[in-house]
Amino acid sequence: MCGIIGYIGSADAVNVVINGLRHLEYRGYDSAGVAYFNGTGVEIKKCKGKIRDLESILYTEKPSSRIAIGHTRWATHGVPSEYNAHPHHSETVVLVHNGIIENYQELKEELLREGYTFSSETDTEVLCHLIDRYHRDLPLDEALRKAIQRVRGSYALVVLSKSQPDKLVGLRKDSPLVLGIGEDGYYLASDVPAFLTRTKKVVFLDDGELVVVSAEGYRVTDLNGDSIQKSIEEITWSPSMADKGEFKHYMLKEIYEQPRAIADTLRGRIIQESWKVNIAEFGLDEDYLKRLKRVTISACGTSWHAALAGKYMIEQIARVPVDVDLASEFRYREPIIQEGDLFIAITQSGETADTLAAQREASRLGAKTLSICNVLGSTSAREADSVFFTHSGPEIGVASTKAFTSQLLSLYLFAIMLASAKGRIEQSHCESLLREATLLPEKIEMILKNEALIAEVAKRYFKVRDFFFLGRGILYPIALEGALKLKEISYIHAEGYPAGEMKHGPIALIDEEMPVLFLIQRSELRKKIYANIEEVKSRGGRVIVVKSTEEPIGNVESINIPSTNQYLESILMVIPLQLLAYHIGVLRGCDVDQPRNLAKSVTVE
Ligand code: AGP
């Protein structure tokens, strides 16, 4: 997933764009570049590596310009290199792009036959020459509207014309693009943090919308050139919330933000006078829920783990059957969706390509779609029939933490709301479930106070090569999440497994080199786990337990957490696993905010 930003106004455009790219670094990238007018023409500076490398080649020129575009590239076509870095250009245009041009090969062959020459291996460069073909006779925006009709794929584009240094043109399809409206100019970017220090006024563009921006204003049109009125939104979170503050890493900051994030997820969602869930927040009506017979949940990665846990909550609280699908599998398995089924997409970014494709497929098959999402204005949120925003604030670290616990809480509220609508829950039970949810922030604070103990445990395990995470019931998905956190942050091979499944093969891996972390719930299931622990200990395995019971367990490392109900245990149990993965990653010298090969949002299939 690339980061793009363009600026036009009265400030130093290159400086604005470079700072904007810094705020997009979290998206993960391998090269960067900027283009600006230098008074006589367009200057393009780009390089493989980080923004600091770009600055070292840029500021020898002391550029001053009132218009500039910039890009951080996460390679999809063509190796990370200076020549593949954006901005790309043709004779008449320069542009930056986030997305994938699926039919770039056929377009490239056509353009080569027409005599165009290429200087990169990227799909993006095809767009430059395609627009160029029309821009010789048409203004930039009309040339872009013509060119884009030939293109299949996903794109967020910011384009400037070498002959028209007074405007930028932006266009999006299946890749986010936001317009920032500032006191001293206008911004076009893939994400709000790129310009949040300069303005909180934003316009979220939708697919197929093109915007022409000058220093004096902007105009949004469709691909026919007809004007579209767009609302101006005010971003509620502050720039500091998108910075690390006093924390060494975004990941640790976001782990510590979970009490507030959980409180924000709850805010306005519980009607405390009646102890009911505020159904309006889900955008679903009571009659629909009363008739609802089946739920399908689809997501990727950590969000998929939330989906798996949500199945336990919804089926046990509301007694409605739930199917859970990996989004990358859903649309290829010829899913059976009945008219009126509810399809829930869980996505922190709202831009994950596989999840968007699953959501669109479910909608095409007749499902009603609900997006549980963390990003206002994201594609999933805007395309779904209804949206439940997790409100956990910007999540910058690639490893999802606060968004995950907010997703679990969102599914818990949904389960209670559905049970109430179906008359399947006593009001007293509903009240006790909701009251317990309001206690979560302080219980998470208690766990965070234990960080030093968890950091000590990390010191004993950061050199291992493998790790098992085991759980039963709703804690099985949490075991999967603990394993994913560890593997993506520390590069240790880690597996999450149902504890009861070990004897069917995986126990062959157990020896004194293999640490096994067990998640132990308060319910009767814990006795089964005790038996599984003995199986591992008797084979020399090194055992760590995370538990909320006071019952002592001999010869194991214990991490204790506060007690709560059987559903919200999933939230409390994951906090120590997040901290364990973080500290092991730091001890191993890993880049915990931008782990190798990973991006914050996977906007390509
Ligand atoms: C989680 O730590 C990972 N970064 C990754 O698995 C992520 O959860 C997945 O890509 C889904 O992202 P989304 O929630 O933004 O759709």
Image (cartoon, rainbow, N blue to C red):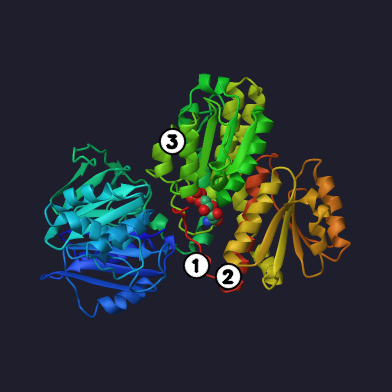
**Residue that carries the numbered disc 1 in the rendered image:** 248
584 up-or-down from 101: above or below: below
576 up-or-down from 279: above or below: below
How far apart marks 3 and 1 lie (CA) works out to 36 Å
290 up-or-down from 434: above or below: above
Q: Is residue 485 left or right of residue 538?
A: left
Q: Is residue 211 left or right of residue 175?
A: left
| Residue 346 location (% of width, % of height) | 52, 43
- Quadrant containing the N terminus in the rendered view: bottom left
Residue drawn at point x = 39 percent, y = 74 percent: 49
Nearest the eye: 424 or 327: 327
Q: Earlier in the sequence, mark 3 or mark 1?
A: 1
**Residue that carries the numbered disc 3 in the rendered image:** 384
Question: Which SS class for mark 1?
Answer: loop
Q: Earlier in the sequence, mark 2 or mark 1?
A: 1
| Residue 395 location (% of width, % of height) | 46, 54
Identify the amino acid type marked 1.
Lys
**Residue that carries the numbered disc 2 in the rendered image:** 586
Determine if residue 556 is in view.
yes
Q: Quadrant of residue 241?
A: bottom left
- Asked if the residue under mark 1 is in contact with the one under mark 2, i.e. CB atoms within 8 Å, the reply is yes
Identify the amino acid type marked 2.
Val
Question: Which SS class for mark 2?
Answer: helix
Q: Earlier in the sequence, mark 2 or mark 3?
A: 3
How far apart marks 2 and 1 lie (CA) works out to 10 Å
Given this view, does label 2 or label 1 mark the residue nearer the observer? 2
Identify the amino acid type marked 3.
Ala
Does any atom of ligand 1 lie closer than 8 Å to the CB of label 2? no
